[in-house]
Image: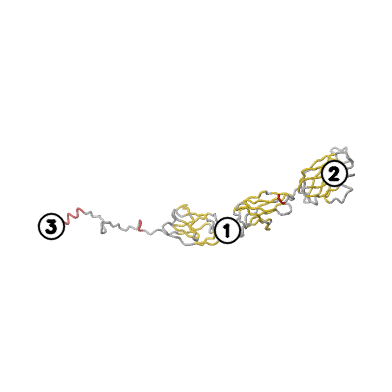
Amino acid sequence: MSHRLITTVIVLALATVIPAHAQPQEPGGTRKTPSTGTGEGMKSPSVSILSIIPAQGEPGTTVILSGTGFSAGTTAFLGSTEVPAKLIEAKQLTFTIPDLAPGLYALFLRREDGTTSRTYSFAVQPLKPIATGLTPDSIDACAAPREREVTISGSNFKAGSQVLFDGAAVRTKFTSSETISFVVPQVAAGLHQVQVRNPEDTYSVTLALLINGRPEITGITTGEGYVNYYNLFVDGKNFQQNSVLVVMEESTVEQNLSPPRMDVKRIRVGTADVISQDVAIFSSCNKLIYRRHPYSTAPKSFQVQVVNPDGTESSVVSITAP
């Protein structure tokens, strides 16, 4: 067999052993993988923020970010503070503003592979005080100082917070971030506004406090007697120095009418200067003294009522006395 024929036979034999699709190998036996444009060799997508809702907020506010390139391991940063984020869907994640001092912060995202987004300015606002209720929410106009303390319930109160009563700052007692109290000043009866202001000039909603000025009679007792008069003590609350004591009793002139005609006396509350006729004396907002001049010592039934200058009336109380 010639040398040329031997060479041809060797080439044919190798062709039957090595498949046509066999891949070339690196030195040492490592097989090369052709580049297909996919897999680990492909560059990771960028992290982009397309919208921030809201663009500012106070601690505790939930912020929604929309964009691309998010992953379950993506976290948010406000300045140097890393904030855990929650992936809602491929193009949306959320985070909650942590307890940071008010101011402007650089907001950006960082994926677990180190890829970061552009930086945006984000304003952290001061916490607003939240007022939810008053205890009590109504006090009597003549309540004693110890009965005039009102507690405000809510949250985000601070040691430097102030209570505003009808827009004016009053002395405030800070108890905790959830309770703060004050003493209601001496003001006219009616609805009044109560609000909390924090040191950063943030304000709570306005709550309504009722100052109850309606007079109320809780009891009438007979006092000491004199030659031609005796005292009746009218106890209650919210009496005023210029209230009117109304006394209603059957007429002594027309006693046989049915129903009987009533004599009505309107006695303006004043001082004890008058001694010859019925008079009402202001002792305190809880007591009036009715100096009564009866025409007879025989007991009779009559009714008493207190009317304040604004027209508010107490209930009518019946009594039997001379």
What amino acid is labelled 3 in the image?
Answer: Ile
Question: Going from the N terminus, do you reach mark 1 or mark 2 first?
Answer: 1
**In front of the other: label 1 or label 2?**
2
As rendered, which of 49 and 227 lies closer to the eye? Answer: 227
Where disc 2 sits, the SS reads strand
Distance between the alpha carbons at the discs numbered 1 and 2: 65 Å
Question: Going from the N terminus, do you reach mark 2 or mark 3 first?
Answer: 3
Q: State the residue position of label 2.
A: 224
Where disc 1 sits, the SS reads loop
Quarter of the image with the N terminus in it? bottom left
Q: State the residue position of label 3.
A: 6
What amino acid is labelled 2 in the image?
Answer: Glu
Identify whether 26 is placed above or below 227.
below
Q: Position of residue 85 (x, y in %)?
A: 48, 54
Residue at image x 38%, y 59%? 43
Where disc 3 sits, the SS reads helix
